[in-house]
Every structure is written in C-alpha cells, then in structure tokens.
Amino acid sequence: MATVLDLTHTLAEGMPVYPGTEPPTLQNANTVAQDGFAEKLLTMYSHTGTHIDAPAHMLAGGATLDQLGAGHFVGQACVLDVAGQRLIERTFLEAHASLIEGSDFVLFHTGWSRLWGQQAYFEAFPVLTLEATRWLAGRNLKGIGFDAISVDPVGSTDFPNHFVLFRQGMISIENLTGLEPLIGKRVLFSCLPLKIKEADGSPVRAVAILD
C-alpha cells in the first residue's frame, strides 16, 4: 500500500498570511448541538496557506486554475535541498539536471517551514535568480514549489520570477511543508486545487505519494 505524505499547512484562524493580506476566518455557522448538523463559513483569500498561484494571478489573460486540466496538478516531482542558500543559481540547477529532467515539478526545500508562525518566516528565504528561473521555465515543467511564502522575495514590487513562470503557463506552489524526507528523491506529487471559476489561486492539499 502506498504511503501518502502530507505537505500541507493546516488552515486555521491566526495562521501566517502574506504581509498585507487578512488572515482567514472559520466560523461555526451551524453546529450539531443547535442545528443537527455542522457547517463552517470560511472567509479567506485565494492564496491562503499552502496554495497554488495560477498564471492569471499576475498575468493579464493568463490561465485560471479552472482552465487547466486536472492533470496539470499531478505528476512526478523532484525535491532539491536549498537550505543555507540565499540565491539559487542556475549552476546549482544544472548540477541536478539529471533529477530535474523527466520531472513535472521541482520542489525546493528551504527549511523555512520550521519558521511557520514566526516573523522570520517572511524574511531572507532562498529564492531563485532570474537566470535560474528562466532555465527552469525551459524544462517543460508544470510548476515549481517552495516551503516558503513566495517564489519572489517579500517586498518585491515587480515579481520577476512569478512572471517568468506564468508566461510559460506554469504554476507555483507556495507554503509547502514536510519536504525534508523527500530531498534528492523523485515522487508522485499532487496539489489539486478547488475548481473555482476564474480562479487566480486556491488553497490545496498537497501530498507526496510513495511506493
């Protein structure tokens, strides 16, 4: 039987969100005790928690998540360890080209998920250089993912890495967690989003499926 490894932060009130974004609210709209059934009213931005950025997030006319086939969110992923790096250079990626080739996703273990809930989570996490992002965009990938808040530094105003990915029709998965056991491996990865009309993004339940 396959082992399913959860790579997702739990959605909860008070959770970390991108600076300037309101945190989610999860209201008990109905309860078993009062109504005979339980139902929550969820209020959150589409890029809350472990989530996908669609090209439409920043690219005018870019694909929305509901326009992408379900297969775009499932495939083989390799996991690279970039902990301790500040900038992820193209030369680093080229040194791991044999693992990247044949993958649908490249996931980056920065180690920042250990800082979840701390101010340091938003600061100085490893990011790709623009040259490295362009190299990845030429590898026929479905997307890339990080166990950090963004594929560009917090405070970026032009989001160069996002735009390189989006112009290639790629997705980015942000706020992953639990990547450490997968470093150096290629695994079956799934990050299926909610099928929201014209979705620029969506929280996901990201998982790795191991034989």
Image (tube, grey):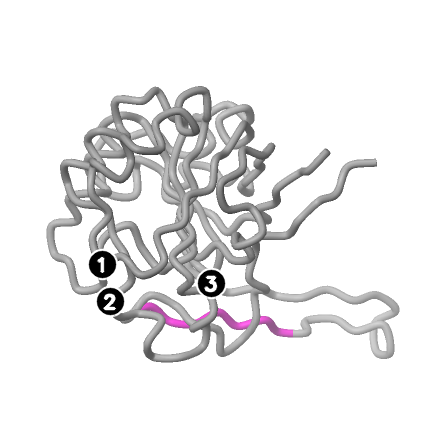
Q: Looking at the image, which is closer to me, 140 or 159?
A: 140
Q: Which mark is residue 124?
A: 2
Separation of disc 2 and disc 3 at Cα?
A: 26 Å
Mark 2 vs mark 1, foreground winner is 1
Badge 3 is on which residue? Answer: 44
Residue at position x 39%, y 68% in the image:
17
Membership of 33 in magenta stretch: no
Q: How many marks?
A: 3
Residue type, numbered disc 1: Arg
What is the C-alpha distance between the residues marked 3 and 1?
Answer: 31 Å
Q: Nearer the viewer, mark 2 or mark 3?
A: 2
Give the residue furthest to the front: 95
Q: Is 127 situated left or right of 174 in this image?
A: left
Q: Residue 12 location in percent, x, y?
A: 57, 71
Q: In 3D space, how far apart are the residues under numbered discs 2 and 1 (Cα atoms)? A: 7 Å
Residue 154 x/y as whole percent? 22, 63
For the residues bearing labels 2 and 1, Cβ distance under 8 angstroms: yes
Residue under the image location 43 percent in, 26 percent down: 67
Q: Which secondary structure lies at badge 1? A: loop
Residue bounds of the magenta highlight: 21-27
Q: Residue 153: horizontal and vertical position, in percent?
A: 21, 59
190 relative position to 106: left or right: right
Identify residue for label 1: 86
**Comes first in the chain, label 2 or label 1:** 1
The picture places residue 188, in percent across and down from the top left corner, at 60, 32
Q: Residues within 10 Å of mark 1 (few under 14, many from 20)?
A: some
Give amino acid for label 3.
Answer: Met
* Label 2: how many Cα within 10 Å (few below 14, some 14–19, many 20+): few
Residue, x 24% and y 67% (percent of image)? 124
Query: Mark 2: which amino acid?
Result: Ala
